[in-house]
Image (cartoon, rainbow, N blue to C red):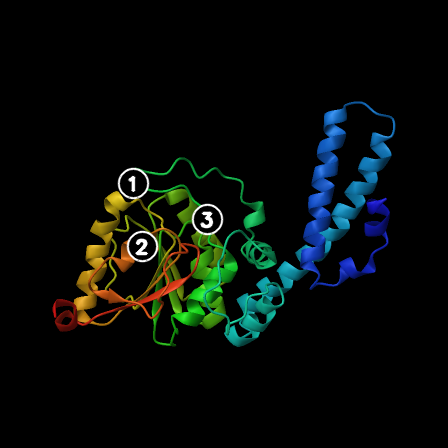
Amino acid sequence: MVLNIFENDEALDIETNLKERANVLDFIASTEAVIAAEGENPMAAPLANRLAAVKSQVAGVNAQLFGRLQKQIRERSVTPAMLRLEFNQYTDYRAEQEGLTHVGPDTLDMLLDGIMALEEYTDPLGPPGPGMNHYVPTPARAILDAVDHIQLKSEDVFYDLGSGLGRVVILAHLATGVKARGVEINPIPNDRARRSAAQLGLAEVEFINADVRQADYSEGTVFFMYTPIKESIFHEMFSKLEHEARRRQIRLCTLGPCTEWVASQPWVKTPVANLEDPFKVIPFYSIAPTQASS
């Protein structure tokens, strides 16, 4: 029986085997669902006890991993470069790779959610506001892809437009050390993002509860967006970014259908030739006003 294997698998106690533990937790959840659906069964109680024991063991190792990283981040005993090496153990993505498609989570998402304690977050987000899309988390490896290929520098100020629970902002900061800010109109996920940043002691991270069309972007140099809003209000928001681009060059990074919208704007350019796949991270650079009008 599969459960016998899990009960005797010492490798599950190795911190870096997070993916294997995730598979175990998925197996336990599906088995518990089957037991519940079958109703009363004299064999159910012993099996449930064994499942609970394995679940407790696996969850304990995960808590140890998440707690260690949380402590190191709070105490600033790890640099962004050290954290990036840690993150690389939980994803197949690497910085030298380009043009990858990012659909769905991988083990890095589980690690990030554990660091941010999002597995404890159960509050409903509520329906999206007018012109907003339903919240869909950005795959964590896509965030690394974005910060790698937009070439973040220490002086940059990174903005995530429609920041939700703050995953993009916090991972971008942890992996690079740059100042990072999120703009989110829904106060519920925005407050939860603030709590995550506060619990980790991230002084260079800020979450702004505001409409993306009205936020102040005067300090921003890099802007990330994963189609947080519908096209009906996208152009209104984008006009604010165009205004900033008249003052200085800014960089944009897109994922999702908004890539097509951004590519249609005359004041931006991208080195990427093929924009047909909406689930690739695409970097854009603003064009000087004289170039855009020529």
Name which residue type carries label 3.
Arg
Residue 59 coordinates in the image, percent (x, y): 70, 51
Residue plotted at (83% across, 41% down): 50
Amino acid on which the number 1 mark rests in the picture = Gly
Nearest to viewer (mark 2 / mark 1): 2
Q: Is residue 165 above or below residue 124?
A: below
Secondary structure category for the residue under label 1: loop
**Which amino acid type corresponds to the residue marked 2 in the rendered image?**
Glu
Q: Which of labels 3 and 2 is toward the front?
A: 2
Nearer-the-camera pick, 206 or 223: 223
Number of residues whose C-alpha sits closer than 10 Å to that of mark 2, classed few (under 14), some (14–19) or many (20 or more): some
Give me the C-alpha separation between circle 3 and circle 2: 31 Å
Residue visible at 79% across and 41% down in the picture: 51
Q: Say which element carries label 3.
A: helix
Closer to the chain start, of discs 3 and 2, is: 3
Quadrant of residue 85 within the rendered picture: bottom right
The residue pinned by badge 3 equals 192
